[in-house]
């Protein structure tokens, strides 16, 4: 049935393209970041999340040592317990910032004034004191902000921070002893539990706050949100009610179940970007989608290959994951025929719409829907790592408009040893 529907759409699409003036078919092609990796501090494990505050990058994950760029594993190492900070302009470790977690951090975010760094994860201690899976740290010293007393009984995967509230998503059932179904909120001042308590029926992986709309966008493995069908993607009010809001994209992009999820969300002043993965029939989305602030789908990439993070800068959307077939999007590549299969672990697209999704040799779920253009000048070569046992490279990407910063478990970039962290210069 899918093939029959695609053939019929192709005829209409071809006719519309022939009738369109050339200007409507021409896509703006912005300049991308350099593919040349810049010297950056390295780690001996995996980086799951990063946040940029001014000229400093704060990173969390699972690692015990940091070492300078160019140093071989086991040499010139400095102890770092699942957290570190480095200069975004030089790539060098910030030696004075060295808080400690007794287990991995999964999510990291900054306060709106940049003075605090909130970390969520699997830990139960920070700097030697009890802090169950969430902690607030001084961005300057790394000391624990003792007035913040948030606490959860299960792991944290996602954080979103507003002026007075920290929103949390993960795999937990209580927050400071109060029932919360994988979503909770705390006062930024004290860590007191807010009344906000939407309910997800499975794990939450991503949150994005849209203050201008009073909305929190939520991504994960869930099939229902607040008891209604919203497979992996939905939105709720950011106030005490936490009631659901319409998010039309979840009628098209649908990832939920045992091995499918919306794994990251990034909100800008005009858009929200979502990335996802799926290994089974529970999902239909493995790349990146752009939505407006009311949840309307602006475009979706039909590339295949799980995608773990996205960052938008200068008219370009950078993604990390393991893309292996992008024949459906304008300018995309076909699936490699090499054995073992080669994956593009960093891919860039135009932020603007550049056409529609065409045929793919693997899947035509999004055939005919608006699509971006792939920008082939940014296809850096990340090697797969072994630390997590998942044979992946980069897991997270962000930046500050001048530099693009990528974290993960890769051992090298562009054939040069560079483990876990790397920077690229933006145009």
Image (tube, rainbow, N blue to C red):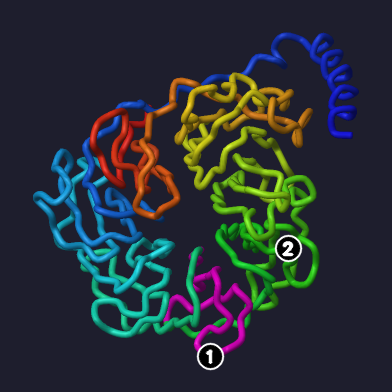
Spot the residue most to the bottom: 177
Q: Is residue 279 above or below residue 106?
A: above
Provide residue 351's location: percent of width, then percent of height.
58, 32
Residue 332: assigned label: none
Q: Residues at badges 1 and 2 in contact (C-beta under 8 Å)? A: no
Span of residues in magenta: 160-189
Is residue 223 left or right of 160 when viewed as pictured? right
Is residue 202 left or right of 61 when viewed as pictured? right
Residue 166 among magenta residues: yes
At a point 79% along the width and 28% down the height, the residue shown is: 368
User: Which residue is more in the foreground, 9 or 280?
Assistant: 280
Report the magenta stretch's main SS.
Answer: strand
Where is mark 2, residue-wise?
223
Q: Is residue 24 above or below residue 372?
A: above
Residue 25 among magenta residues: no
Q: Is residue 326 above or below residue 407?
A: above
When asked about the image quadrant of residue 171, the answer is bottom right
Closer to the N terminus: mark 1 or mark 2?
A: 1
Provide residue 335's location: percent of width, then percent of height.
58, 25
Under tag 2, what secondary structure? loop
Where is mark 1, residue-wise?
177
Quarter of the N terminus within the rendering: top right
At a point 39% along the width and 62% down the height, the residue shown is: 110
When asked about the image quadrant of residue 379, the answer is top left
Calculate the distance from the C-alpha at mark 1 to the C-alpha at mark 2: 25 Å
Any part of residue 80 in sight: yes
Spot the residue most to the left: 76
When asked about the image quadrant of residue 331, the answer is top right
Select label 1 or label 2 by which is in front: 2
At a point 75% along the width and 52% down the height, the residue shown is: 250
Quarter of the C terminus within the rendering: top left
């Amino acid at each position: 049935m899918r093939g029959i529907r695609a053939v019929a759409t192709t005829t209409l699409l071809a006719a519309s393209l022939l009738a369109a003036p050339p200007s409507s078919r021409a896509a703006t092609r912005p300049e991308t970041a350099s593919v040349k990796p810049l010297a950056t501090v390295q780690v001996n494990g995996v980086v799951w999340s990063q946040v940029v505050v001014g000229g400093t990058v704060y990173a969390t994950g699972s690692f015990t040592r940091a070492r300078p760029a160019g140093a071989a594993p086991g040499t010139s190492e400095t102890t770092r317990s699942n957290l570190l900070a480095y200069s975004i302009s030089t790539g060098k470790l910030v030696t004075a910032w060295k808080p400690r977690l007794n287990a991995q951090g999964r999510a990291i975010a900054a306060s709106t004034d940049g003075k605090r760094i909130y970390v969520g994860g699997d830990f139960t201690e920070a700097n030697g004191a009890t802090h169950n899976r969430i902690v607030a740290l001084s961005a300057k010293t790394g000391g624990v902000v003792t007035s913040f007393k948030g606490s959860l009984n299960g792991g944290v995967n996602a954080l979103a921070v507003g002026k007075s509230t920290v929103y949390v998503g993960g795999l937990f059932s209580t927050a400071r002893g109060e029932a919360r179904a994988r979503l909770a909120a705390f006062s930024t001042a004290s860590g007191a539990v807010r009344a906000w308590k939407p309910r997800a029926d499975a794990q939450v992986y991503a949150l994005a706050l849209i203050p201008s709309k009073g909305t929190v966008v939520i991504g994960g493995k869930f099939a229902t949100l607040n008891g209604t069908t919203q497979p992996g993607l939905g939105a709720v009010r950011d106030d005490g009610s936490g009631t659901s809001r319409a998010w039309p994209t979840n009628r098209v992009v649908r990832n939920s179940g045992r091995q499918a999820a919306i794994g990251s969300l990034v909100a800008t002043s005009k858009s929200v970007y979502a990335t996802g993965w799926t290994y089974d029939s529970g999902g239909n989305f493995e790349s990146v989608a752009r939505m407006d602030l009311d949840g309307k789908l602006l475009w979706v990439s039909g590339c295949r290959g799980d995608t773990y993070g996205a960052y938008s800068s200068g008219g370009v959307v950078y993604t990390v994951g393991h893309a292996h077939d992008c024949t459906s999007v304008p300018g995309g590549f076909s699936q490699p025929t090499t054995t073992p299969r080669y994956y593009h672990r960093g891919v860039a697209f135009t932020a603007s719409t550049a056409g529609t999704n065409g045929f793919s040799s693997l899947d035509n779920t999004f055939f005919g829907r608006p699509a971006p253009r792939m920008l082939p000048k940014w296809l850096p070569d990340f090697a797969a790592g072994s630390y997590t046992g998942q044979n992946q490279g980069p897991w997270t990407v962000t930046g500050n408009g001048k530099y693009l910063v990528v974290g993960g478990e890769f051992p090298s970039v562009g054939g040069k040893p560079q483990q876990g962290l790397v920077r690229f210069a933006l145009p």
